[in-house]
Image (cartoon, rainbow, N blue to C red):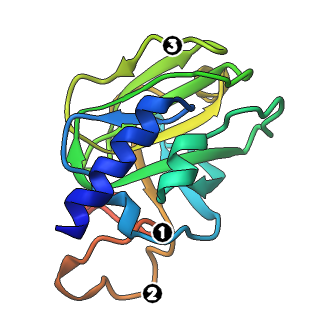
Amino acid sequence: MRGKICALALGLLLAAGGCGPSTDGDNETAAVPAAAPVTLQIHSATGQRHSFTVELAVDDLSQQRGLMGRTTLPDDHGMLFPFPVPHTASFWMKDTPLALDLLFIRPDGTIAAILPGQPNDLHPLSAGEPVSAVLEIRQGRARALGLTAGDRVRWGDCTGTPAPAGNAWRPDRFCPEGFD
């Protein structure tokens, strides 16, 4: 019951505005505490590896706010919206003055789509398929780094630390098989 109440509250907050996700499923991100920034890695099809320091948007407030009001974003930084259950997510850019690349990440860790988010645009952006996360980085970075759909993504400590018991979801760690 608490999860449904939290999901309803999240839906109402997102409907009220903000740079962040809107979802078509029962998303229980409200029950997950905010986490410290983590390192996210992208392995491109060309064999290159790229690292970003990402803020995690996992609670109601951070998902509603997203990157609203920010005027700068370093090349190697971003914001990640991880979801405990894959779903078809859509994002808008309300009150977000930055142009962003939005990378929609599938449950297997591959990038489903890279879409351009225009400043203050209210049109929803979606990959049109279930994703486990969406990464926002400064617009143009994906192209500059040669990132494309199909490239592989992971974040958090994926080396030397055993997976959580029962494959429990953790917003600060996403380690799909076959990454290396």
Sequence order check, earlier mark of 1 and 3: 3
Residue at 57% across / 25% down in the picture? 101
Mark whose residue sits in front, 2 or 1: 1
Q: Which residue is mark 3?
A: 122
The residue type indicated by label 3 comes to Leu
- Give whichever of 94, 112 is nearer the camera: 94
Marks 2 and 1, how far apart at CA: 15 Å
How many C-alpha atoms fall within 10 Å of the one at disc 2: few (<14), some, or many (≥20)?
A: few
How many C-alpha atoms fall within 10 Å of the one at disc 1: few (<14), some, or many (≥20)?
A: many
How many C-alpha atoms fall within 10 Å of the one at disc 3: few (<14), some, or many (≥20)?
A: some
Residue 64 in percent (x, y) is at 53, 42
Left/right placement of residue 175 relative to residue 17 reads: left
- Give whichever of 31, 5 is nearer the camera: 5
The residue type indicated by label 1 comes to Asp
Position of the N terminus by quadrant = bottom left
Q: Which mark is residue 160?
A: 2
Marks 1 and 3, how far apart at CA: 29 Å
Q: Quadrant of residue 171?
A: bottom left
Helix, strand or loop for disc 2:
loop
Query: Does 134 appear above or below 15?
Result: below
Sequence order check, earlier mark of 3 and 2: 3
Left/right placement of residue 153 relative to residue 164 reads: right
Sequence order check, earlier mark of 2 and 1: 2
Residue at 19% across / 49% down in the picture? 26
The residue type indicated by label 2 comes to Gly
Q: Which residue is mark 1?
A: 172
Q: Is residue 174 visible?
A: no
Mark whose residue sits in front, 1 or 3: 3
Query: Does 60 appear above or below 69?
Result: below
Helix, strand or loop for disc 1:
loop
